[in-house]
Image: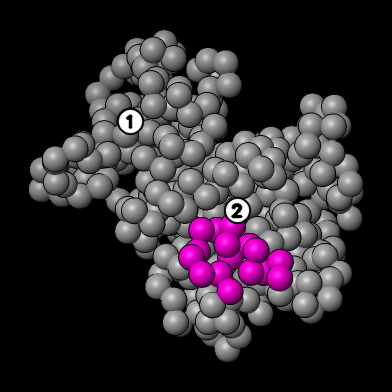
Amino acid sequence: MADRVRMKEIRTGVAQTSSHLIEVEDLHTHFPTQDGVVKAVDGVSFEIEAGKTLGVVGESGCGKSITALSIMKLIEKPGRIVGGSIKLDGFDIVNATDDEMREIRGNDISMIFQEPMTSLNPVYTCGDQIAEAVSLHGNMGRREAWNKAVEMIRDVGMPDPKRRAKQYPHELSGGMRQRVMIAMALSTDPALLIADEPTTALDVTIQAQILELMKALREKNKMAIMLITHDLGVIAEMADEVVVMYAGKVVERSDVNTIFAQPHHPYTHGLLASIPRLGEKRERLEVIKGVVPNPLNLPKGCLFKRRCPHAMPVCDTAPPFQQIGPNHFSLCWLTADQKPPAIGADATGAIAEETAAAMSPSK
Ligand SMILES: Nc1ncnc2c1ncn2[C@@H]1O[C@H](COP(=O)(O)OP(=O)(O)O)[C@@H](O)[C@H]1O
Ligand code: SF4
Ligand SMILES: [Mg+2]
């Protein structure tokens, strides 16, 4: 079991350690299906320090949620983690027992989901649900746990917390339910909060409030946050580091400023180009032509090549995760200044046929 005391020390800066709160290394999570193996997560690595936020971006289906659920060890069978390691303050999550994981989920890692109704129980009041989590975690009596629940409901910015605590989830608006779920997730004072598209379903005003709330709690509790979103505006607002995922892999990784100022991977360029500008109405992601490849029929070499405007013959070979700058990596053959690599005349040759097809206006 991870050492809670030491984790608390790390969060409060008492302990001197160079290690990260969470370290994911070369994670592979696969789902065997009738038609073949879906490699939902295929070699993902990242770390998060206490008090910092990692933003995880990418289109739908690229493996963000399965990465998060792997950390929680909540992968539905027959899916399973088939390789790599996940360390929570040095503790080996991949090989943890069910009992150890229950304890970790009740104390050290919390997760909030896009749709709060999936994690709230409709037959208990909001206060009872938070009190239950609090009492399991803190070994408290009923009355004390209830008071703490009301306090948490106040902390997440819900007016009239005593009355709210007595309400059932269906009596609340979407934004209020999301707050209850956040209150529940934070009631155990987790070292790591995983937020999977936490504000996608909410209107912009509520979204901004929830993000402010998460920021405040990050400061107060030195909590690490893994923030999954396809919204780059949210990333700019919240994240310290960013990983960009595509088809189960990390295609680019750097600090948040570099991702916006000097993106390297053509996929990241596409994501950034698809941010709607003020006063401009257009569908997100329209700039990236084509669709995410079928996980059961992945292209050979670079998984992005059918959609990439820079695709070249060398891209039929899997690209390296090359270092572009300090703390900046990209899974692409292009050089740091985005030129084709000097590895033979072929490399600068014609655009691969598949790409030409993907880019043609008829598509
Ligand atoms: N239970 C499952 N069985 C088979 N494939 C799955 C299952 N759950 C997820 N996947 C596949 O794993 C991939 C990654 O999914 P997910 O992590 O949910 O994507 P994201 O959260 O980035 O939208 C997708 O191709 C998805 O179809
Ligand atoms: S490796 Fe080639 S196809 Fe893949 S992103 Fe880089 S340039 Fe595009
Ligand atoms: Mg998801």
Nearest to the observer: residue 105 or residue 298? 105
Residue type highlighted by circle 2: Ile
Residue at position x 47%, y 53% from top?
A: 210
Whether residue 359 is visible: yes
Residue 92 placement (x, y as % from top left): 82, 50
Give the residue type that dot 1 points to: His
Q: Residue at x 44, y 82 (%)?
A: 171
* Direction from residue 141 to residue 134 in the image, left or right: left
Callout 2: SS: strand
Does 43 appear above or below 114? above
Residue 221 percent across, percent down from the top left = 69, 45
Of badges 1 and 2, the one in the foreground is 2
Q: Which residue is mark 1?
A: 269
Q: Residue at x 53, y 22 (%)?
A: 328
Q: Quadrant of residue 130?
A: bottom right
- Name the mark on residue 194: 2
Q: Residues within 10 Å of mark 1 (few under 14, many from 20)?
A: some
What is the span of residues highlighted in magenta in the rendered image? 147-162
Q: Is residue 219 left or right of residue 268?
A: right
Mark pair 1, 2: CA separation: 26 Å
Residue 69 visible in image: no
Q: Earlier in the sequence, mark 1 or mark 2?
A: 2
Q: Picture coordinates of residue 277 (x, y %)?
A: 20, 36
